[in-house]
Image: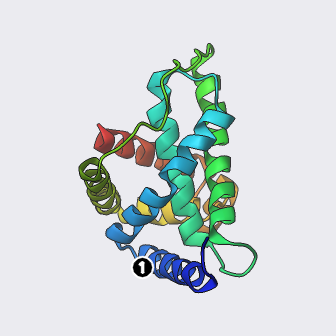
Amino acid sequence: MFSDSGIGQAVADEARLIARARLGDGEAFAALVDSYKRLVYWHISHSASFISAADEEDLYQEGLVGLLKAVRTYDGVSSAFATYASSCICHSVISAARRLRKQNGDVVPLDDTELVSGSSPESDLLDRESISLLYERVFSRLSGYERSVFELYLSDRSYADIARVMGKTEKSIANAICRIRRKLKKLLG
């Protein structure tokens, strides 16, 4: 059984991680990813059950983008962060799954392997370090324009809103987001 002070401390620790991640601290974001990794995979398995195994990694990355959106836009008032993050992750995974289905035309069910495999402390540490490095590398590889577009995209704005704020066309914004996605895929491998 949890004590109220233990739960309060966990919430305070998470709030500090959110604040640090919002300021660009890759290690703080990696710690949040570690905490929410299972939730991302849960949303993938429940929201996108008929995707190919090859597309699973793309959906995982989109789930992480959803988590990053949650970190950037959480107000700390309307709900618990876990609830808000779950909603953002779900939205990102569903949107990405729809895009993948549309692109692929045909969908293949995932194989029966478990999405979240058992992990060791060593692999968890490597995962956290990898995500921290990825976070820093992503932002360092984007041009100033792409960073601005990506920040607005992460705050869940539509292409039209981003175009209006940036003083560009929707096509320019779509192209920038396409370049950002290509850079993300290239960084991932």
Q: Is residue 78 visible?
A: yes
Residue 32, position in %: x, y?
A: 46, 64
**Of all residues shown, which one is farthest toward the bottom?**
5
Instruction: Tell whether 111 sits left or right of 76.
Output: left
Foreground residue among 105 and 94: 94
Q: Above or below — where is 114 with respect to 2?
A: above
Residue 126, position in %: x, y?
A: 25, 52
Residue 47, position in %: x, y?
A: 68, 36
The quadrant of the picture occupied by the C terminus is: top left
The quadrant of the picture occupied by the N terminus is: bottom right
Foreground residue among 110 and 151: 110
The image quarter containing residue 6 is bottom right
Residue 122, position in %: x, y?
A: 23, 51
The image quarter containing residue 145 is bottom left
Foreground residue among 179 and 76: 76
Residue that label 1 marks: 20
